[in-house]
Image (spheres, rainbow, N blue to C red):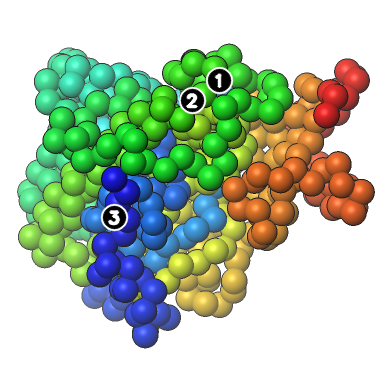
C-alpha cells in the first residue's frame, strides 16, 4: 500500500496562482507554533509520491512554504538529536555549541525577554537548566533521547523553575505532548503573543504506534528506497553503532520494508496529533496571527545506502523537512535555498521583531521568503564525529572519510539519490579539488580542526 499527498494538497501547492503573495501581516506581533519531530526524513512530508501519509502537514505546506534544502550541521556523537537541538535553540553552528547550552542563550529565552509567553512540551535533550531558562512554562517534558512511548518518564516545570517528579506516560507520549499543546492554546489569554514549542519523540525508534495505524501499511507493498543497498560499499567509520545494529547484515528487502512500515505508521500517527494541535489553534482564533513551523532534527537512512541510522552525511540523513505557514510567509511555494536548521529561529525572530541571543550565527531567511534574494548560503558543511566531513553547493557534494582516505563526489542535480560516485572519474578531478578547498575554508570558518587526510594509505576502490 503506497500513500501519497492528498489531491487537494498537491493542487494547492503547485497550482496556486498567487504563489508570491504572503499571508497578511497581523495587527500585532505574530504568535509562533513550532512543531519539531524526531528522526524524520525530508521526503516523508509535502512530497508527491511519498509512501508516508501526512495530510495535516501537507495541508500546512499547501498554505505556506516548503524549504527543500534545510540541513542539520551534523554531530560529534552518535546521538545527532542532541547537537541538532542545541544548534536549533542557540542559533550556533556545530563547533560552537555547548551540548547542554551552558552559558549560551537560546532563541526561546530571547522571545520571552521580548514579551512573549513561552511554553514547551515533549523531548528536551539539553539539560534542565537550559529548559528553565528558555521557557516560562513546560508540561510533559521528556528529559532524554529515546524510550518506549507508553512508558516514557515525563516531568512538568514548576513555578520555581525546577522539574517536578517523574511519572510514566501510560498513554502514547506523542498524544500526551499534543494534549499539553492543545491545553496551552486553549488556556492562553492576554495580549502577549506566544511561542509554543512541541518536540515530538517520533518517528524515532522504538517505533510503536496504535495498531490501527500500523495496519494501514502492508510491508510487501512498500517500495524500497531508490538507493537501497544490502550493505554500505565500504567502512564509513561508523558501521557498528547501535542504530546500524537495528537490522542484520546484509539488509534484506523484507527487513527494510518492515522497518519502513513501522516508520510510516509512526509518521501518520504523529501527523494526526499535529492535526489536533492545528485544530486547537483554529478554535482559539489564532490561525491567522500565528507562524507555524514543522521541522525535524535530521533525517534517517532506513535501508538507504545499506545504512539504518543517521550517523552519515548522505542527503537522506542530514536533510530535514521544513515547512512554514502564516504571517509573512508566501503561500504555495517550494524554495530550494540552501540553509541550516539553525537558520529557522533567526527567520522567526525577524518576522516577530525579536533580537536573537548572543552568539547566534544563523541567517534569517526572510529575504528569501520576500523574493529579495534566491538564497542566503551558497553551500553547507556537514560533519560526523572525526570520521566524515561533507560540503554541498547548488549542484555538487563531496563527502570525505579521513580515517580511510576515501572521498565520494555526487552530482546532486542529475543524481539526487547519490547512487553514482564520480570521485574517480578524471573528468571530475577539478571538481574534487575545488570542493576540497571549499570544505577546508568552511571548516576554518566554523572552528572545525579535523584534518581531511589520514597518514594511512588510501583504501582500495
Residue pushed farthest front? 220
Q: Position of residue 298 (x, y in %)?
A: 47, 39
Quadrant where the N terminus sits is top left
Q: As rendered, which of 246 and 345 lies closer to the eye?
A: 246
In the depicted structure, whether residue 361 falls above or below residue 193 = above
Give the number of marks. Answer: 3
Q: Position of residue 180 (x, y in %)?
A: 14, 38
Q: Which residue is identified by label 2?
A: 252
Q: Quadrant of residue 305?
A: top right
Q: Position of residue 148 (x, y in %)?
A: 26, 19
Q: As rendered, which of 404 and 67 lies closer to the eye?
A: 404
Q: Residues within 10 Å of mark 2 (few under 14, many from 20)?
A: some
Q: Residue at the location (12% across, 26% down)?
A: 171
Labels 1, 3: front one: 1
In the depicted structure, whether residue 172 falls above or below residue 2 = above
Q: Is residue 77 left or right of residue 224?
A: right
Callout 1: SS: loop
Q: Is residue 205 left or right of residue 363?
A: left
Q: Are marks 2 and 1 in contact (CB under 8 Å)?
A: yes
Q: Residue at the location (14% across, 49% down)?
A: 276
Callout 2: SS: loop
Specify the label residue 409 is tagged with.
Answer: none
Q: Which residue is identified by label 1?
A: 250
Q: Residues within 10 Å of mark 1 (few under 14, many from 20)?
A: few
Q: Position of residue 3 (x, y in %)?
A: 30, 51
Q: Residue at the location (79% across, 46% down)?
A: 422
Between marks 2 and 1, how big is the CA–CA gap?
Answer: 6 Å
Q: Which residue is identified by label 3?
A: 57
Amino acid at each position: 500500500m503506497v500513500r501519497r499527498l492528498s489531491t487537494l494538497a498537491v493542487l494547492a501547492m503547485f497550482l496556486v496562482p498567487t504563489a508570491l503573495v504572503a499571508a497578511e501581516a497581523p495587527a500585532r506581533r505574530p504568535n509562533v507554533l513550532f512543531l519539531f519531530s524526531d528522526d524524520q526524513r525530508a521526503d516523508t512530508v509535502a512530497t508527491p509520491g511519498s509512501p508516508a501519509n501526512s495530510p495535516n502537514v501537507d495541508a500546512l505546506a499547501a498554505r505556506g512554504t516548503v524549504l527543500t534544502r534545510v540541513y542539520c550541521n551534523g554531530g560529534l556523537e552518535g546521538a545527532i538529536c542532541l547537537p541538532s537541538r542545541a544548534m536549533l535553540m542557540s542559533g550556533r553552528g556545530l563547533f560552537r555549541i555547548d551540548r547542554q547550552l551552558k552559558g549560551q542563550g537560546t532563541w526561546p529565552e530571547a522571545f520571552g525577554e521580548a514579551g512573549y509567553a513561552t511554553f514547551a512540551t515533549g523531548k528536551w535533550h539539553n539539560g534542565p537548566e537550559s529548559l528553565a531558562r528558555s521557557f516560562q512554562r513546560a508540561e510533559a517534558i521528556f528529559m532524554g533521547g529515546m524510550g518506549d512511548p507508553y512508558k516514557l518518564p515525563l516531568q512538568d516545570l514548576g513555578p520555581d523553575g525546577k522539574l517536578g517528579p517523574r511519572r510514566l506516560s501510560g498513554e502514547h507520549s506523542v498524544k500526551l505532548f499534543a494534549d499539553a499543546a492543545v491545553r496551552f492554546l486553549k488556556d492562553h489569554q492576554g495580549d502577549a503573543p506566544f511561542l509554543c514549542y512541541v518536540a515530538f519523540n517520533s518517528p524515532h525508534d522504538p517505533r510503536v504506534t496504535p495498531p490501527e495505524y500500523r495496519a494501514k501499511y502492508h510491508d510487501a507493498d512498500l517500495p524500497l528506497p531508490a538507493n537501497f543497498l544490502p550493505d554500505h560499499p565500504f567502512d564509513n567509520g561508523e558501521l557498528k553503532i547501535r542504530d546500524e545494529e537495528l537490522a542484520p547484515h546484509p539488509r534484506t528487502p523484507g527487513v527494510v520494508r518492515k522497518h519502513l512500515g513501522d516508520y510510516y505508521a509512526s509518521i501518520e500517527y504523529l501527523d494526526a496529533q499535529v492535526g489536533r494541535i492545528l485544530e486547537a489553534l483554529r478554535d482559539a482564533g489564532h490561525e491567522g496571527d500565528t507562524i507555524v513551523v514543522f521541522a525535524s532534527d535530521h533525517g534517517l537512512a532506513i535501508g538507504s545506502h545499506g545504512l539504518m541510522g543517521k550517523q552519515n552525511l548522505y542527503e537522506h540523513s542530514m536533510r530535514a523537512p521544513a515547512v512554514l505557514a502564516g504571517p509573512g510567509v508566501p503561500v504555495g511555494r517550494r524554495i530550494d535555498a540552501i540553509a541550516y536548521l539553525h537558520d529557522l529561529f533567526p527567520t522567526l525572530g525577524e518576522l516577530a521583531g525579536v533580537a536573537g541571543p548572543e552568539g547566534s550565527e544563523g541567517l534569517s531567511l526572510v529575504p528569501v521568503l520576500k523574493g529579495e534574494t534566491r538564497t542566503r548560503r551558497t553551500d553547507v558543511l556537514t560533519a560526523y564525529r572525526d570520521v566524515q566531513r561533507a560540503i554541498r553547493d547548488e549542484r555538487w557534494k563531496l563527502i570525505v572519510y579521513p580515517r580511510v582516505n576515501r572521498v565520494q563526489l555526487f552530482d546532486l542535480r542529475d543524481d539526487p539519490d547519490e547512487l553514482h560516485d564520480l570521485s574517480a572519474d578524471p573528468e571530475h578531478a577539478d571538481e574534487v579539488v575545488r570542493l576540497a578547498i571549499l570544505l577546508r575554508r568552511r571548516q576554518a570558518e566554523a572552528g572545525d580542526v579535523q584534518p581531511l587526510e589520514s597518514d594511512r594509505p588510501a583504501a582500495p576502490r
